[in-house]
Amino acid sequence: MNWIREFKQFAMRGNVVDMAVGIIIGAAFGKIVSSLVADILMPPIGKLMGNVDFSNLFIVLGAGSYPSLAAAKAAGAATLNYGIFINTVIDFIIVAFAIFLMIKGINALRRREEAKAVPPPPPGPSAEEKLLAEIRDLLKKNT
């Protein structure tokens, strides 16, 4: 029963819970980005390139010719799906850039908080205090 308590302590740590929330949000964000790329970005790019559907760009490895990737897969043909790869690379670039911006913002907030948390150094002695210290030191020296 000791291992149950240890597991509970591990699972309820802030870092583990934060990581789980991040993974769940990241998965949802990934779906949104995939839809953005496949449904919003790639159709206009494909249209500009002469009605090219990137998700349907493939090379058949072997004999045969198929009108679409779905037809090639249905026939069991081995294919090199470079259009889907292009979509995935664009997904990755968008996600990586969004994460970069998020981390950059978090770091800026941390720097601001750290600057607030560190108290300024105490002011040095005033001119009068320096003069009095010199007088004290001279008096000590002469006695």
Image (cartoon, helix red, strand yellow):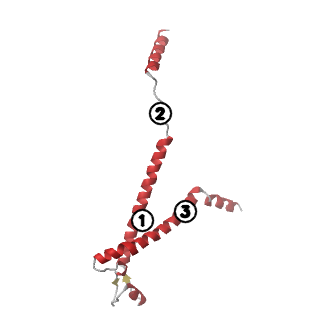
The picture quadrant where one finds residue 83 is bottom left
- Check residue 95 in the rendering and tell me which mark sits there, or answer none: 1
Question: How far apart are labels 3 and 1 at the CA level?
Answer: 17 Å
Name the residue type under label 2. Pro
**Image coords of residue 65 (percent x, y):** 33, 90
Specify which label sits upstream in the sequence, 3 or 1: 3
Question: How far apart are labels 2 and 3 at the CA level?
Answer: 39 Å
Which residue is situated farthest in the top direction here?
143
Question: How far apart are labels 2 and 1 at the CA level?
Answer: 42 Å
Whether the residues at callouts 2 and 1 have beta carbons within 8 Å, the answer is no
Which quarter of the image is occupied by the N terminus?
bottom right
Crowdedness near tag 2: few (<14), some (14–19) or many (≥20) residues, C-alpha within 10 Å: few
Name the residue type under label 1. Val
> Would you place residue 71 above or below residue 21 in this image?
below
- Secondary element under disc 1, as helix, strand or loop, is helix
Whether the residues at callouts 2 and 3 have beta carbons within 8 Å, the answer is no
Specify which label sits upstream in the sequence, 2 or 3: 3
The picture quadrant where one finds residue 77 is bottom left
**Image coords of residue 40 (percent x, y):** 38, 73
Residue annotated with mark 3: 21
Name the residue type under label 3. Val
Which residue is situated farthest in the right direction here?
1
Look at 44% across and 17% down and name the residue there: 131
- Secondary element under disc 2, as helix, strand or loop, is loop
Residue annotated with mark 2: 121
